[in-house]
Image (spheres, rainbow, N blue to C red):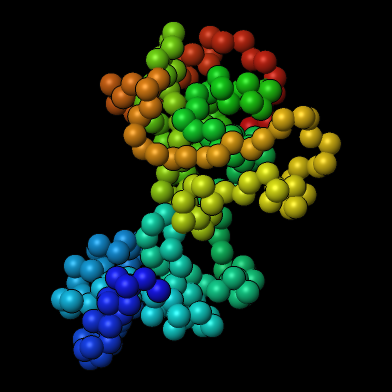
Amino acid sequence: MSRASAAEAQRSMSDPTAFREACRIAEALLFASAEPLDAAALASRLPRDVPVEDVLARLREDYADRGVRLVETAGKWTFRTADDLSWLLAREAQEARRLSRAALETLAVIAYHQPVTRAEIEDIRGVSAHRGTLDALLETGWIRLRGRRRTPGRPVTYGTTEAFLVHFGLSAVDDLPGLDELKGAGFLDGRLPPGFAVPAPSDDPTLRADEDPLDEDLFTVLAQEKADEIEEPLRGEDGS
């Protein structure tokens, strides 16, 4: 433990009553909130001089062997059912919409290659990316329109959202599995071409040098994308 961490822990324990009350407050806020909370939101409601990091560490420790656990996702904190008990709730879970294989593949391309345009998604997958597939992903809230690529036609770029991280239980997009993990899980076989690599994903919201901000509303952008799709010849069946 660093000197700073030790000093913070010492301050937390110097007033055990305040620390216990802070833990109770944070616990109540996290249980009552429908959405994950970040540390700043929690700290604003805690007693002064009680570091929120120490409170979260204590709650995480207290719930480590419980039916629910405190987890960090997308830089925020929430209670989730323990992984080994998730099967108990499987019957109660309801999927708002079952995504097609094409949609899942498109989502994976966006997650790993963002910011990415529809044409780039098509190049990676080798088939046409129908507008309906991207519409379905936009409806889930897992992807968003980032900006426009500085290339002829100024195509829209896509990226993932905080809702994507929350749904898949990721603290950050770079927690997505890498090459070795994908091979170990059986998603990739051993006969990969030389030099094959899985891109290091990044969902940095800052527009890149080759991106311009969107200068239209969402309806206008989607209408233009639909018009472009109708005009373009399809290269293959998407399966959506």
Q: From the viewer's perspective, is residue 175 above or below residue 24?
A: above
Identity of the residue drawn at 43% across and 22% down: 156
Residue farthest toward the left in the current orientation of the protein: 48
Q: Which residue in the rendered view is the most extreme toward the bottom?
A: 17
Q: Is residue 7 left or right of residue 178?
A: left
Towards the viewer: 130 or 196: 196
Residue 166, visible in the rendered structure: no
Q: Residue 211 location, x and y as percent?
A: 38, 22
Looking at this view, is 237 or 188 the one in front?
188
Instruction: Please name the residue shown 57% across and 49% down the image.
Output: 176
Residue 52's spot in the image, x, y percent?
28, 71
Give the total of numbered labels.
0
Q: Is residue 144 above or below residue 230?
A: below
Residue 223 in percent (x, y) is at 40, 20
User: Does residue 198 appear in this view?
Assistant: yes
Along the horizontal axis of the image, is 3 left or right of 151? Answer: left
In the current view of this chain or complex, which residue is farthest to the front? 3
Which quadrant of the figure contains the N terminus?
bottom left
The image shows residue 95 at horizontal and vertical percentages of 56, 55
Which residue is located at x 53 percent, y 16 percent?
229
Q: Quadrant of residue 159?
A: top left
Q: Looking at the picture, does residue 69 appear above or below residue 19?
A: above
Question: Is the residue 30 above or below the residue 188 in the image?
Answer: below
Left or right, 103 with reference to 226: right
Quarter of the rendering occupied by the C terminus: top right
Q: State the residue at coordinates (62%, 49%).
A: 177
